[in-house]
Image (cartoon, rainbow, N blue to C red):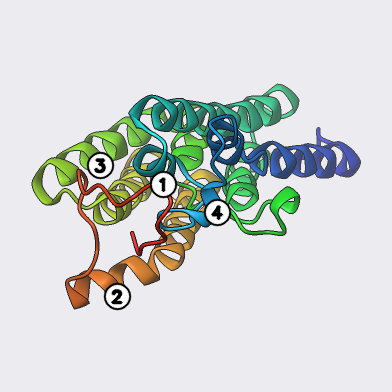
Amino acid sequence: MNSGTGLGAGAGVILVAYLLGSIPFSYFVARRRGVDVRKVGSGNVGATNVMRSVGRGPGLLAFALDFLKGTAATVLALSVEREGPLPAIAAATAVVGHMYPVWLRFRGGKGVATGAGAFLPVVPAATVAGLVAFGLALAITRYVSVSSLVGCATLAAVAFFVRGPSAVAFAATAMALLVLWKHRGNLARIAQGTENRLGACPGKRRRTRS
Protein backbone atom coordinates (compact mmCIF):
# COMPACT_ATOMS: atom_id res chain seq x y z
CA MET A 1 0.00 0.00 0.00
CA ASN A 2 1.36 3.41 -0.91
CA SER A 3 1.53 6.44 1.34
CA GLY A 4 -1.74 7.79 -0.03
CA THR A 5 -3.71 4.83 1.27
CA GLY A 6 -4.32 4.63 4.99
CA LEU A 7 -3.47 1.39 6.74
CA GLY A 8 -7.05 1.01 7.94
CA ALA A 9 -8.48 1.57 4.46
CA GLY A 10 -6.09 -0.93 2.95
CA ALA A 11 -6.85 -3.54 5.59
CA GLY A 12 -10.56 -2.99 5.06
CA VAL A 13 -10.22 -3.52 1.32
CA ILE A 14 -8.28 -6.74 1.87
CA LEU A 15 -10.92 -8.01 4.30
CA VAL A 16 -13.71 -7.23 1.85
CA ALA A 17 -11.73 -8.91 -0.95
CA TYR A 18 -11.51 -12.06 1.15
CA LEU A 19 -15.22 -11.97 1.98
CA LEU A 20 -16.16 -11.43 -1.67
CA GLY A 21 -13.92 -14.28 -2.74
CA SER A 22 -15.38 -16.54 -0.08
CA ILE A 23 -18.98 -16.24 -1.33
CA PRO A 24 -19.64 -19.88 -2.34
CA PHE A 25 -21.58 -19.28 -5.54
CA SER A 26 -20.99 -22.83 -6.78
CA TYR A 27 -22.56 -24.14 -3.59
CA PHE A 28 -25.56 -21.81 -3.95
CA VAL A 29 -26.11 -22.60 -7.64
CA ALA A 30 -26.08 -26.34 -7.02
CA ARG A 31 -28.18 -26.01 -3.88
CA ARG A 32 -30.96 -24.36 -5.90
CA ARG A 33 -31.12 -27.65 -7.81
CA GLY A 34 -31.31 -29.62 -4.57
CA VAL A 35 -27.69 -30.74 -4.70
CA ASP A 36 -25.00 -30.22 -2.08
CA VAL A 37 -21.96 -29.93 -4.31
CA ARG A 38 -19.72 -30.90 -1.38
CA LYS A 39 -21.28 -34.37 -1.37
CA VAL A 40 -21.30 -35.24 -5.07
CA GLY A 41 -18.72 -35.69 -7.77
CA SER A 42 -15.31 -34.59 -6.53
CA GLY A 43 -16.78 -32.74 -3.55
CA ASN A 44 -15.05 -29.60 -4.80
CA VAL A 45 -16.97 -26.34 -4.40
CA GLY A 46 -16.24 -25.13 -7.92
CA ALA A 47 -17.79 -24.65 -11.33
CA THR A 48 -16.38 -27.85 -12.83
CA ASN A 49 -17.97 -30.01 -10.17
CA VAL A 50 -21.26 -28.12 -10.56
CA MET A 51 -21.15 -28.74 -14.31
CA ARG A 52 -20.49 -32.44 -13.88
CA SER A 53 -22.96 -32.93 -11.04
CA VAL A 54 -25.81 -30.57 -11.95
CA GLY A 55 -25.44 -29.63 -15.60
CA ARG A 56 -23.67 -27.37 -18.08
CA GLY A 57 -25.93 -24.35 -17.55
CA PRO A 58 -25.52 -24.23 -13.77
CA GLY A 59 -21.81 -24.90 -14.18
CA LEU A 60 -21.37 -21.95 -16.53
CA LEU A 61 -23.40 -19.75 -14.18
CA ALA A 62 -21.19 -20.77 -11.26
CA PHE A 63 -18.09 -20.02 -13.33
CA ALA A 64 -19.39 -16.58 -14.28
CA LEU A 65 -20.28 -15.67 -10.71
CA ASP A 66 -16.93 -16.89 -9.37
CA PHE A 67 -15.18 -14.89 -12.09
CA LEU A 68 -17.15 -11.73 -11.34
CA LYS A 69 -16.57 -11.85 -7.58
CA GLY A 70 -12.84 -11.86 -8.26
CA THR A 71 -13.20 -8.89 -10.56
CA ALA A 72 -15.30 -7.05 -7.98
CA ALA A 73 -12.62 -7.48 -5.32
CA THR A 74 -9.91 -6.02 -7.54
CA VAL A 75 -12.04 -3.18 -8.87
CA LEU A 76 -12.82 -2.22 -5.28
CA ALA A 77 -9.09 -2.09 -4.50
CA LEU A 78 -8.43 -0.03 -7.64
CA SER A 79 -11.05 2.49 -6.52
CA VAL A 80 -9.01 3.02 -3.35
CA GLU A 81 -5.49 2.79 -4.80
CA ARG A 82 -4.62 2.96 -8.49
CA GLU A 83 -0.87 2.64 -8.00
CA GLY A 84 0.80 0.43 -5.44
CA PRO A 85 0.37 -3.16 -4.32
CA LEU A 86 -3.17 -3.04 -2.90
CA PRO A 87 -5.02 -4.21 -6.06
CA ALA A 88 -2.61 -7.12 -6.49
CA ILE A 89 -2.97 -8.11 -2.84
CA ALA A 90 -6.76 -7.89 -3.11
CA ALA A 91 -6.73 -10.09 -6.23
CA ALA A 92 -4.70 -12.79 -4.50
CA THR A 93 -6.80 -12.47 -1.34
CA ALA A 94 -10.02 -13.04 -3.29
CA VAL A 95 -8.54 -16.29 -4.60
CA VAL A 96 -7.65 -17.35 -1.06
CA GLY A 97 -11.21 -16.53 -0.02
CA HIS A 98 -12.59 -18.80 -2.72
CA MET A 99 -10.26 -21.62 -1.73
CA TYR A 100 -10.86 -21.25 2.01
CA PRO A 101 -14.30 -19.65 2.54
CA VAL A 102 -15.27 -18.83 6.08
CA TRP A 103 -18.91 -19.62 5.23
CA LEU A 104 -18.16 -23.29 4.43
CA ARG A 105 -15.67 -23.99 7.21
CA PHE A 106 -12.77 -23.08 4.90
CA ARG A 107 -13.58 -25.80 2.41
CA GLY A 108 -13.81 -24.17 -1.00
CA GLY A 109 -12.84 -24.52 -4.62
CA LYS A 110 -9.58 -24.34 -6.50
CA GLY A 111 -9.59 -20.67 -7.41
CA VAL A 112 -9.17 -20.73 -11.18
CA ALA A 113 -12.27 -18.79 -12.24
CA THR A 114 -11.95 -16.35 -9.34
CA GLY A 115 -8.27 -15.84 -10.13
CA ALA A 116 -8.98 -15.06 -13.77
CA GLY A 117 -11.62 -12.54 -12.78
CA ALA A 118 -9.43 -11.01 -10.10
CA PHE A 119 -6.39 -10.43 -12.30
CA LEU A 120 -8.27 -9.24 -15.39
CA PRO A 121 -8.49 -5.59 -14.22
CA VAL A 122 -4.79 -5.32 -13.31
CA VAL A 123 -3.12 -7.41 -16.00
CA PRO A 124 -5.63 -7.98 -18.82
CA ALA A 125 -3.14 -9.18 -21.46
CA ALA A 126 -1.79 -11.87 -19.14
CA THR A 127 -5.28 -12.93 -18.11
CA VAL A 128 -6.42 -13.29 -21.72
CA ALA A 129 -3.25 -15.26 -22.49
CA GLY A 130 -4.00 -17.52 -19.53
CA LEU A 131 -7.56 -18.12 -20.68
CA VAL A 132 -6.37 -18.93 -24.21
CA ALA A 133 -3.77 -21.33 -22.82
CA PHE A 134 -6.46 -22.94 -20.66
CA GLY A 135 -8.69 -23.45 -23.70
CA LEU A 136 -5.91 -24.91 -25.83
CA ALA A 137 -4.76 -27.26 -23.08
CA LEU A 138 -8.33 -28.39 -22.49
CA ALA A 139 -8.85 -29.09 -26.20
CA ILE A 140 -5.67 -31.16 -26.28
CA THR A 141 -5.81 -33.03 -22.97
CA ARG A 142 -9.47 -32.79 -21.87
CA TYR A 143 -8.15 -32.56 -18.31
CA VAL A 144 -9.62 -29.51 -16.56
CA SER A 145 -6.96 -29.82 -13.86
CA VAL A 146 -4.04 -29.75 -16.30
CA SER A 147 -5.65 -26.92 -18.25
CA SER A 148 -6.13 -24.92 -15.06
CA LEU A 149 -2.47 -25.27 -14.16
CA VAL A 150 -1.34 -24.36 -17.67
CA GLY A 151 -3.62 -21.32 -17.69
CA CYS A 152 -2.45 -20.05 -14.29
CA ALA A 153 1.22 -20.61 -15.12
CA THR A 154 0.77 -18.72 -18.39
CA LEU A 155 -0.95 -15.83 -16.61
CA ALA A 156 1.91 -15.56 -14.12
CA ALA A 157 4.62 -15.81 -16.79
CA VAL A 158 3.03 -13.20 -19.04
CA ALA A 159 2.44 -10.92 -16.04
CA PHE A 160 6.20 -10.88 -15.46
CA PHE A 161 6.77 -10.22 -19.16
CA VAL A 162 4.39 -7.27 -19.42
CA ARG A 163 4.78 -5.81 -15.92
CA GLY A 164 8.24 -6.93 -14.88
CA PRO A 165 8.98 -7.76 -11.24
CA SER A 166 5.99 -6.10 -9.61
CA ALA A 167 3.32 -6.72 -6.99
CA VAL A 168 0.94 -7.92 -9.71
CA ALA A 169 3.44 -10.40 -11.16
CA PHE A 170 4.37 -11.77 -7.74
CA ALA A 171 0.69 -12.02 -6.74
CA ALA A 172 -0.08 -13.89 -9.96
CA THR A 173 2.77 -16.29 -9.21
CA ALA A 174 1.46 -16.81 -5.68
CA MET A 175 -1.97 -17.58 -7.13
CA ALA A 176 -0.46 -20.10 -9.57
CA LEU A 177 1.35 -21.85 -6.71
CA LEU A 178 -1.84 -21.97 -4.62
CA VAL A 179 -3.74 -23.45 -7.57
CA LEU A 180 -0.98 -26.02 -8.01
CA TRP A 181 -1.27 -26.95 -4.32
CA LYS A 182 -5.05 -27.32 -4.59
CA HIS A 183 -4.62 -29.63 -7.61
CA ARG A 184 -2.09 -31.96 -6.00
CA GLY A 185 -4.71 -34.71 -5.72
CA ASN A 186 -5.65 -34.33 -9.38
CA LEU A 187 -2.00 -34.65 -10.41
CA ALA A 188 -1.66 -37.81 -8.35
CA ARG A 189 -4.73 -39.28 -10.07
CA ILE A 190 -3.37 -38.34 -13.49
CA ALA A 191 -0.20 -40.25 -12.64
CA GLN A 192 -2.36 -43.22 -11.59
CA GLY A 193 -4.55 -42.97 -14.69
CA THR A 194 -7.73 -42.43 -12.67
CA GLU A 195 -8.40 -38.72 -13.29
CA ASN A 196 -11.65 -38.00 -15.15
CA ARG A 197 -11.42 -36.13 -18.45
CA LEU A 198 -13.91 -33.50 -19.54
CA GLY A 199 -17.01 -35.24 -20.83
CA ALA A 200 -16.87 -38.06 -18.30
CA CYS A 201 -20.28 -38.37 -16.67
CA PRO A 202 -20.13 -39.74 -13.15
CA GLY A 203 -23.51 -40.21 -11.49
CA LYS A 204 -24.95 -37.08 -9.92
CA ARG A 205 -25.28 -38.57 -6.48
CA ARG A 206 -22.40 -41.00 -6.54
CA ARG A 207 -19.19 -39.78 -4.93
CA THR A 208 -16.28 -40.13 -7.36
CA ARG A 209 -12.76 -38.84 -7.67
CA SER A 210 -12.84 -36.14 -10.33
Residue 134 in the image: x percent, y percent? 25, 42
Residue 47 in the image: x percent, y percent? 44, 40
Of callouts 4 and 2, the N-terminal one: 4
| Label 3 secondary element | helix
Q: Residue 134 carries which label?
A: 3
Q: Can residue 22 be seen in this view?
A: yes
**Callout 4 touching callout 2 (CB < 8 Å):** no
The local crowd at label 1, few if under 14, some if 14 to 19, many if 20 or more residues have their Cα within 10 Å, is: many
At label 1, the amino acid type is Asn
At label 3, the amino acid type is Phe
**Residue denoted by label 2:** 188
Q: Quadrant of residue 70?
A: top right
Q: Nearer the viewer, mark 4 or mark 2?
A: 4
**Callout 2 touching callout 1 (CB < 8 Å):** no
Q: Residue at x 21, y 37 (%)?
A: 135
**Residue denoted by label 4:** 38
The mark total stands at 4
Q: Which mark is residue 49?
A: 1
Q: Is residue 198 left or right of residue 155?
A: left
**Callout 2 touching callout 3 (CB < 8 Å):** no
Is 73 in front, or is 45? Answer: 45
Q: How far apart are marks 3 and 1 (CA)?
A: 17 Å
At label 2, the amino acid type is Ala
Where is 195 relative to 10, above or below? below
Of callouts 2 and 1, the N-terminal one: 1
Q: Distance between the residues labelled 2 and 3?
A: 20 Å
The local crowd at label 3, few if under 14, some if 14 to 19, many if 20 or more residues have their Cα within 10 Å, is: many
